Image (cartoon, rainbow, N blue to C red):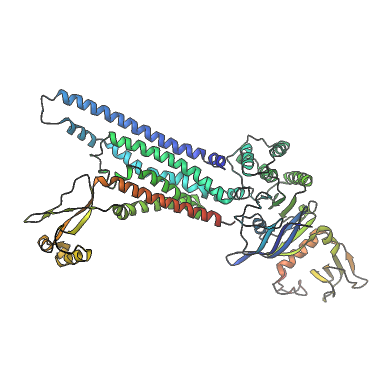
Amino acid sequence: MTAALETLGLGRRYHTTWGLRDCTLLVPEGTVTGLVGPNGAGKSTLLRMAAGLSRPTAGTVSVFGSPVHPNGTDHLGRVGYLDQFHPLYRYFSVAEMLAVGRKLNSRWDDASARKWLEDLAIPLDKRVGRLSGGQQAQVALTLCMAKRPDLLLLDEPVASLDPLARKRLLQALMGTVADRGTTVFLSSHIISELEPLCNYLIVLSASRVQTAGSIDDLLANHRLLVGPRRDQPPDGVEVIDVTQTSRQTTYLVRGVAPTLGSDWQSLQPDLEEIVIAYLTKGETDGAPPIPVDADSDPKGGAA
Amino acid sequence: MIWLTWRQHRAVLAVSAAVVVAFVVWMMIVEHDYSTAVRAIARSCNASRAYSPNTPCSALYSSEALAWGQGDIIRWILLVLPLMFGVLLGAPLFAGEFERQTVILAFTQNISRTRWMVIRWLVIGLSVFVLSVALAGVSNWWFLHVPTNGSSFGYRIQPGQFDVTGIAPAAYSLFAFALGAALGMALRRTARAIFGTVVLFVAVRILFEHYFRRQLAAPTFSPATVFASGYSFDVSASSWNVGRGYRVRPGSAYPTSQTYINHIVNLCSKPFGVQSTGCLSKHGVQLGVLFQPSSHFWTLQWGETGSYIAAVAALFGLTLWSVRRWRA
């Protein structure tokens, strides 16, 4: 499988803090890969470096095998980037925005762009600034799609939209992507939104990649072990997250689950539980170890 | 990209062009009124020849020009107009893109940053060039028709009138534009870039006028006329007096080096920095005045224009470097 996007030890430092650190990942060609993480985890930083807008402090980022430089031009024709604030020229009409795309891109698909906007009932002669937020996002996405990119980078594409506009935008996006075989890399902090769209998932937290893999693998490789209270973590398995109450202990583990006893249950976690476990792990890594009894310890650092 | 630049700036270009056109029309009206008045004076003067045969009619025209207050207003506007290009077209050229984040849109299309910057700069810079050269053409025509003699701006070689005559005003306009664009790119805020453009433009113009312009051509020396009770300088009113000077009397056997002159000037100095002309003369040194005669006008104009154009080129380079260096 060739990589549409590959990063190696990628990092970006803002003055003294790292916006992204030690990020090594691979987005296979033809996949729809979701990037989840809390606000400030480094999602936008990663996407901006992939789009050539930002220069890495450490490591490299390549698109279809060639490194991306902010002043390079190789990636520009193949990559479509949708910023989370979807900036547009507010005083231009929608038709003029399409003209911008047509004049600045070599592989421009004007007919599809017009057809798409027509389907969405966005009038071409209206000024961009007079459109609703959802319509502006649609216009921005149209500009990305019509340049027929091989890799589409979408930073929080639906964050500012109401649920209906959200659904419409994602449907429109996925319909077109499926037709063209475009690789999509999109970020979101809403897991439920990504699950139906994506076949790959990357969890980013505290400026580091916590886990990455296909959604099927993630689901198959994790188990939720629920049983009576137990202070000793199970052996031979990687514990991602522990939830303790006075009578019950829940482990989210990676790998083949060990047998802990007859009073233990092994359950299939859903994607959200897995992701949250990794996000929690990311937040607490480097912090003091999780106290055994988080409920009774007033100095608990895990809360 | 040319279309995009034009589309983004057509409104502000139209405003700039309208300001220039309105101003030119006003200049033409003033010129027309002046010519009409002068013709009327000529007629009445010729008619009244019999009563005052000793007064030449041209003296009456000059007094009419003196009273022409609008001439000074026009000069002041010409002095300030280059800043309009810096503020309206230069400062927002890049700063606006960063403020509205549309630079992110531009930098993710299939066009290199260099091309984006160069075309953007050149399309608007060329518009500034056309407008400012047209304005310079009209104002030069205007000064040929409405006499400058009575103006408080002085003769065309002198600071003031020099700054609104010839080709240099067009270079000031381009400089203001390039300065605005470079500051806009460096600060990425339009309001700050406008403020910086105004301050730096005024500072550069004043410094150049007071310290550098006089060095663009070697000044002419005119020896003082020495009387028993002192001395006087004799310089034409149409020259630009740039200060006191000394030289070794031509044809004398004294060394002509600057070291020798400085030595004698020190030797002959009396309190309050005044030299005894007798003492200077005894050692073969003449006191005089340095000035730029009106014949140096075009040398100074081209020197000044060249200097400002060099600054424009440097600012262009800095802006390009800054655009390529930017990262989100």
A68 lies above or below B164: below
Q: Residue furthest left?
A: B228
Left or right: A200 with respect to B4? right
Left or right: A105 with respect to B154? right
For the C terminus of chain A, which image quadrant? Answer: bottom right
Q: Is residue B192 visible?
A: no
Q: Residue furthest top?
A: B47
Q: Residue furthest right?
A: A262
For the N terminus of chain A, which image quadrant? Answer: bottom right
Q: Is residue A26 visible?
A: yes
Residue depicted at x 75% and y 52%: A183
Left or right: B169 with respect to A146? left
Expressed as whole percent of the image width and height from the top left, the position of residue B274 reads 15, 61
How many numbered discs sit on the rendered protein? 0
Expressed as whole percent of the image width and height from the top left, the position of residue A153 reads 70, 52
Q: Quadrant of residue B324?
A: bottom right
A292 lies above or below A54: below
Front residue of A14/A60: it is A60
Expressed as whole percent of the image width and height from the top left, the position of residue B32 reads 30, 29
Front residue of A258/A266: it is A258
